Image: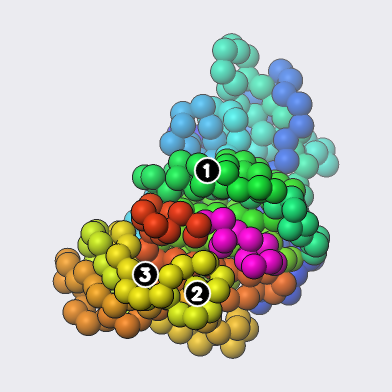
Amino acid sequence: MLRLIATLLITTSLLPAEENLATGVLYPKLGEWTDAGDLAMACPPVAQHSPGHFYRVAAAKDPEVTAVYHTTDNTAFKVDDPKVNVKALNLVAELPVKGGMITQKGDQWFVVGQRPGLKLPQKALITWQETAPIAPRQIDPKNIRVALFDDYGSFGKGIPRCTELLGKAEGVTVKLVKPELIREGGLKDFDVIIFTGGSGGKQAGSLGLIGREQVRRFVEAGGGYLGICAGNYLACEGFSWGVHILDAKTKSSKWARGEGDVKIEFTPKGREILGMPEGILDIRYANGPVFNPAEDADIGDFEPLAYFRSELAKNGAPVGAQVNSPAMVIGNYGKGRVLCSSPHPEQQAGMEPFVERAVRWIAGGK
């Protein structure tokens, strides 16, 4: 595995440091690919522009891709550190080249490596860019553009079910999006983003450091965030790899409570927003979070839309913690709205209106 460390100039962040998840981190935007020439032999083990920010390359899961990680502690950083979610906290980009290395020639930076189907090494000019800004938005309720995250970490029926339900909604368009689009600032062309069930930590890893910051900026600028099950963990406080847009954390670290049907009851506000009936209702549950206030002074308190009225407590999860705890909540972050559902209404017969109603509410309407 070829690895390289490069340090780059620290630039002024567009957002206050206490809010920015990726302060001073730059994104490597690539130019056209050409033959590497003498650069193929000139890549040093370390390329330093200025001290403070290090960019290390490593093989990605796809052998034809090179991952780029950022760290401020070159000595201690380990790409395969099992104690932390390295991809979520440090991944900056995934470049379409095998065995890629970063090098400098004059005042220009390049990535050099092997491209599919070509014998000679190739190079591409790197333009190091600040994390793309996302301007404040005014959402047109008659044309709501939804980004549905579709990559590693989003598993099961959530993506096809949300696609199906929103496909029937008038004035709503849905596009499946990948981490690369998000990292490059592509959420500027959407009004709402949805993260469905699967694994919040793996979703965070797929997004990487820059992708997580782009999601945070998107909501802060007025975008809507809908999380279902795993997408709630991604939104919450309490995890180093989260995007930290909801003032909530889990009641217990033993989150794997089990899968099956539980009972919930909607609040009057929940019935108003989501169009759900009164009374105790069955719903599918699969290890979603049990919400508790995180008491973050920089984020407004969440408001429950529904409460659990029964529970699952398998795998050593604390008994009684889920009953009468919030099952669905709403909150605000910056100019944006957040709606999170621990259970799976998109998969529950009788709750078909949930996804469309949730999208319309977080987009700014009822």
> Residue 188: percent from the left, percent from the top?
74, 52
Residue at coordinates 43% horizontally, 36% vertically from top-left? 61
Magenta stretch in the rendered image: 355-366
**Position of 64 relative to 16 (above/below):** above
| Element type at mark 3 | loop
Mark identifier at residue 25: none
- Of residues 355 and 45, the one nearer the viewer is 355
Mark identifier at residue 289: 3
Q: Are marks 1 and 3 in contact (CB under 8 Å)?
A: no
| Element type at mark 2 | helix
**Position of 121 relative to 225 (above/below):** above
Q: Quadrant of the C terminus?
A: bottom right
Q: Is residue 146 visible?
A: yes
> Tag 2: residue type?
Gly
Q: How far apart in space, not on screen, are marks 3 and 2 (Cα)?
A: 18 Å
> Tag 3: residue type?
Pro
Determine whether, in the image, residue 222 is placed left or right of residue 300: right
| Element type at mark 1 | helix
- Of residues 337 and 366, the one nearer the viewer is 366
Q: How far apart in space, not on screen, are marks 2 and 1 (Cα)?
A: 23 Å
